[in-house]
Amino acid sequence: MAPPIDTRDPAATRTPSRGRCFLYVVPSAYEDLLKIGHSRDPLARLQALHRRWFEVFDLEHALLVETDSVRDARGLELAFQRQFQQHNAPAPLTVQPEAGGHSEWYRGASEPLCISVRALASQGFVLHDPAWHWLRHEMLVRSDGLFSWTQAMLSVDELELASIATPRQRVVRDALDAHLAFGIAVEPLLPEAVWRWYCAAA
Protein backbone atom coordinates (compact mmCIF):
# COMPACT_ATOMS: atom_id res chain seq x y z
CA MET A 1 0.00 0.00 0.00
CA ALA A 2 1.13 3.56 -0.57
CA PRO A 3 2.42 5.80 2.22
CA PRO A 4 -0.28 7.06 4.58
CA ILE A 5 -1.02 10.77 4.56
CA ASP A 6 -1.33 10.74 8.38
CA THR A 7 2.24 11.19 9.62
CA ARG A 8 1.64 10.43 13.28
CA ASP A 9 3.57 7.59 14.87
CA PRO A 10 1.01 4.83 15.60
CA ALA A 11 2.74 4.04 18.91
CA ALA A 12 2.43 7.65 20.02
CA THR A 13 -1.35 7.76 19.79
CA ARG A 14 -3.74 6.45 22.42
CA THR A 15 -3.67 2.78 21.50
CA PRO A 16 -3.72 -0.26 23.80
CA SER A 17 -0.30 -1.15 25.17
CA ARG A 18 -0.65 -4.81 24.26
CA GLY A 19 0.21 -6.08 20.81
CA ARG A 20 3.35 -6.20 18.74
CA CYS A 21 5.52 -3.13 18.71
CA PHE A 22 9.04 -2.46 17.45
CA LEU A 23 12.16 -0.74 18.64
CA TYR A 24 13.83 0.71 15.54
CA VAL A 25 17.37 1.94 15.01
CA VAL A 26 17.86 3.66 11.67
CA PRO A 27 21.21 5.17 10.61
CA SER A 28 21.55 8.07 8.23
CA ALA A 29 22.93 7.12 4.83
CA TYR A 30 25.22 10.14 4.68
CA GLU A 31 26.62 10.81 8.16
CA ASP A 32 27.28 9.16 11.52
CA LEU A 33 23.80 9.94 12.80
CA LEU A 34 20.96 7.61 13.68
CA LYS A 35 17.45 7.67 15.03
CA ILE A 36 16.13 5.35 17.70
CA GLY A 37 12.45 5.06 18.51
CA HIS A 38 9.49 2.73 18.80
CA SER A 39 6.47 2.20 16.60
CA ARG A 40 3.75 -0.33 15.90
CA ASP A 41 4.37 0.30 12.20
CA PRO A 42 8.03 1.04 11.41
CA LEU A 43 7.36 1.32 7.68
CA ALA A 44 4.78 4.07 8.15
CA ARG A 45 7.07 5.72 10.69
CA LEU A 46 9.98 5.95 8.25
CA GLN A 47 7.67 7.21 5.52
CA ALA A 48 6.53 9.95 7.87
CA LEU A 49 10.05 11.07 8.72
CA HIS A 50 11.21 11.90 5.19
CA ARG A 51 9.56 11.73 1.79
CA ARG A 52 12.70 10.06 0.36
CA TRP A 53 13.13 7.81 3.39
CA PHE A 54 14.44 4.93 1.28
CA GLU A 55 17.40 7.09 0.21
CA VAL A 56 18.26 9.16 3.29
CA PHE A 57 18.33 6.17 5.67
CA ASP A 58 20.85 3.32 5.47
CA LEU A 59 18.24 0.57 5.57
CA GLU A 60 20.77 -2.21 5.00
CA HIS A 61 22.20 -1.39 8.43
CA ALA A 62 18.92 -0.51 10.15
CA LEU A 63 17.63 -2.75 12.95
CA LEU A 64 14.18 -3.73 14.20
CA VAL A 65 13.48 -5.47 17.50
CA GLU A 66 10.03 -7.00 17.99
CA THR A 67 8.40 -6.69 21.40
CA ASP A 68 5.08 -7.86 22.81
CA SER A 69 3.81 -4.39 23.70
CA VAL A 70 4.31 -0.67 23.31
CA ARG A 71 5.45 -0.59 26.94
CA ASP A 72 8.25 -3.08 26.25
CA ALA A 73 9.44 -1.22 23.16
CA ARG A 74 9.31 2.12 24.95
CA GLY A 75 11.26 0.64 27.86
CA LEU A 76 14.04 -0.53 25.55
CA GLU A 77 14.12 2.84 23.83
CA LEU A 78 14.40 4.73 27.11
CA ALA A 79 17.18 2.43 28.32
CA PHE A 80 19.25 3.09 25.20
CA GLN A 81 18.52 6.80 25.35
CA ARG A 82 19.88 6.94 28.88
CA GLN A 83 22.90 4.82 27.96
CA PHE A 84 23.84 7.04 25.01
CA GLN A 85 22.58 10.36 26.32
CA GLN A 86 25.92 12.08 25.71
CA HIS A 87 25.52 11.39 21.98
CA ASN A 88 22.11 13.06 21.70
CA ALA A 89 22.03 15.41 18.71
CA PRO A 90 19.62 17.72 16.88
CA ALA A 91 17.40 16.16 14.24
CA PRO A 92 18.38 16.83 10.61
CA LEU A 93 16.69 19.85 9.11
CA THR A 94 15.39 17.69 6.27
CA VAL A 95 13.21 15.58 8.57
CA GLN A 96 9.54 16.50 8.34
CA PRO A 97 8.75 18.61 11.44
CA GLU A 98 5.25 17.19 11.86
CA ALA A 99 6.70 13.68 12.27
CA GLY A 100 8.00 14.50 15.76
CA GLY A 101 10.74 12.51 17.51
CA HIS A 102 13.22 15.38 17.30
CA SER A 103 15.00 14.40 20.53
CA GLU A 104 15.65 10.82 19.40
CA TRP A 105 18.72 11.37 17.22
CA TYR A 106 22.26 10.34 18.18
CA ARG A 107 25.61 11.23 16.64
CA GLY A 108 28.81 9.22 16.88
CA ALA A 109 27.17 6.23 18.59
CA SER A 110 26.24 4.01 15.66
CA GLU A 111 28.65 1.15 16.30
CA PRO A 112 28.26 0.73 20.09
CA LEU A 113 24.51 1.34 20.00
CA CYS A 114 23.93 -1.23 17.25
CA ILE A 115 26.08 -3.76 19.12
CA SER A 116 23.93 -3.24 22.21
CA VAL A 117 20.72 -3.60 20.21
CA ARG A 118 21.92 -6.79 18.50
CA ALA A 119 22.65 -8.25 21.94
CA LEU A 120 18.89 -8.24 22.60
CA ALA A 121 18.60 -11.32 20.39
CA SER A 122 20.33 -13.34 23.12
CA GLN A 123 17.54 -12.26 25.49
CA GLY A 124 14.87 -13.83 23.31
CA PHE A 125 13.80 -10.80 21.30
CA VAL A 126 13.14 -11.23 17.58
CA LEU A 127 15.74 -9.16 15.74
CA HIS A 128 15.41 -8.09 12.10
CA ASP A 129 18.98 -7.45 11.00
CA PRO A 130 18.97 -5.73 8.63
CA ALA A 131 15.50 -4.19 8.73
CA TRP A 132 15.59 -3.94 4.92
CA HIS A 133 14.10 -7.42 4.47
CA TRP A 134 11.22 -6.78 6.89
CA LEU A 135 10.48 -3.45 5.22
CA ARG A 136 10.50 -5.01 1.75
CA HIS A 137 8.08 -7.71 2.90
CA GLU A 138 5.74 -5.06 4.29
CA MET A 139 5.96 -3.09 1.04
CA LEU A 140 4.93 -6.20 -0.88
CA VAL A 141 2.07 -6.99 1.49
CA ARG A 142 0.66 -3.49 1.09
CA SER A 143 1.33 -3.10 -2.63
CA ASP A 144 -2.15 -4.31 -3.60
CA GLY A 145 -3.42 -0.89 -2.60
CA LEU A 146 -1.25 0.98 -5.09
CA PHE A 147 -3.74 0.64 -7.95
CA SER A 148 -6.66 2.36 -6.26
CA TRP A 149 -4.47 4.78 -4.30
CA THR A 150 -2.62 6.17 -7.33
CA GLN A 151 -5.87 6.32 -9.26
CA ALA A 152 -7.43 8.42 -6.50
CA MET A 153 -4.35 10.61 -6.02
CA LEU A 154 -3.84 11.81 -9.59
CA SER A 155 -6.36 13.77 -11.60
CA VAL A 156 -6.75 13.47 -15.36
CA ASP A 157 -4.88 16.76 -15.77
CA GLU A 158 -2.01 15.57 -13.58
CA LEU A 159 -1.71 12.35 -15.56
CA GLU A 160 -1.34 14.37 -18.75
CA LEU A 161 1.62 16.34 -17.35
CA ALA A 162 4.92 14.66 -18.21
CA SER A 163 6.50 16.26 -15.17
CA ILE A 164 6.41 16.37 -11.38
CA ALA A 165 4.67 19.69 -10.83
CA THR A 166 2.09 19.17 -8.07
CA PRO A 167 2.35 17.98 -4.46
CA ARG A 168 0.25 14.90 -5.24
CA GLN A 169 2.47 14.01 -8.16
CA ARG A 170 5.50 14.21 -5.88
CA VAL A 171 3.85 11.98 -3.27
CA VAL A 172 2.99 9.35 -5.87
CA ARG A 173 6.43 9.54 -7.50
CA ASP A 174 8.13 9.07 -4.12
CA ALA A 175 5.94 6.07 -3.29
CA LEU A 176 6.68 4.38 -6.61
CA ASP A 177 10.39 5.18 -6.35
CA ALA A 178 10.39 3.52 -2.92
CA HIS A 179 9.02 0.30 -4.40
CA LEU A 180 11.69 0.31 -7.10
CA ALA A 181 14.37 0.90 -4.46
CA PHE A 182 13.29 -2.39 -2.88
CA GLY A 183 13.30 -4.21 -6.20
CA ILE A 184 9.50 -4.34 -6.46
CA ALA A 185 8.17 -3.97 -10.00
CA VAL A 186 5.33 -1.46 -10.01
CA GLU A 187 4.03 -1.69 -13.58
CA PRO A 188 1.74 -4.69 -12.82
CA LEU A 189 0.40 -2.85 -9.76
CA LEU A 190 -0.67 0.37 -11.47
CA PRO A 191 -3.39 1.61 -13.81
CA GLU A 192 -1.98 1.92 -17.32
CA ALA A 193 -2.40 5.70 -17.30
CA VAL A 194 -0.42 6.04 -14.06
CA TRP A 195 2.38 3.85 -15.38
CA ARG A 196 2.61 5.92 -18.58
CA TRP A 197 2.77 9.13 -16.55
CA TYR A 198 5.42 7.72 -14.22
CA CYS A 199 7.64 6.65 -17.12
CA ALA A 200 7.22 9.98 -18.90
CA ALA A 201 7.92 12.00 -15.76
CA ALA A 202 10.99 10.02 -14.70
Image (tube, rainbow, N blue to C red):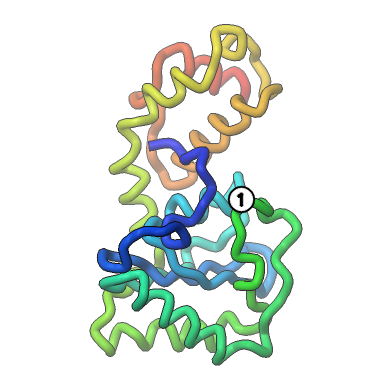
- Residue at 36 percent of width and 59 percent of height: 15
Residue 133 seen by the camera: no
x and y percent of residue 71 in the render? 36, 75
* Quarter of image, res 192: top left
x and y percent of residue 102 in the render? 65, 66
Residue 4 seen by the camera: yes
- Residue at 67 percent of width and 81 percent of height: 88
Element on which disc 1 rests:
loop
Look at the picture and state if 51 lies above or below 150.
Answer: below
Outermost residue, front direction? Answer: 14
* Quarter of image, res 85: bottom right
Q: Which amino acid does label 1 sit on?
A: His
- Residue at 37 percent of width and 51 percent of height: 136
Q: How many labels does the image show?
A: 1
- Residue at 41 percent of width and 59 percent of height: 14
> Where does label 1 land, which residue?
50
The quadrant of the rendering that contains the N terminus is top left
User: 30 or 52, which is in the foreground?
Assistant: 52
Q: Locate residue 27 relative to residue 166 in the image: left or right.
A: left
Q: Locate residue 123 relative to residue 33 in the image: left or right.
A: left
Local crowd at mark 1 within 10 Å, few (<14), some, or many (≥20)? Answer: some
The quadrant of the rendering that contains the C terminus is top right
x and y percent of residue 98 in the render? 64, 51
x and y percent of residue 31 in the render? 69, 69
Look at the picture and state if 97 lies above or below 191.
Answer: below
User: 176 or 81, which is in the foreground?
Assistant: 81
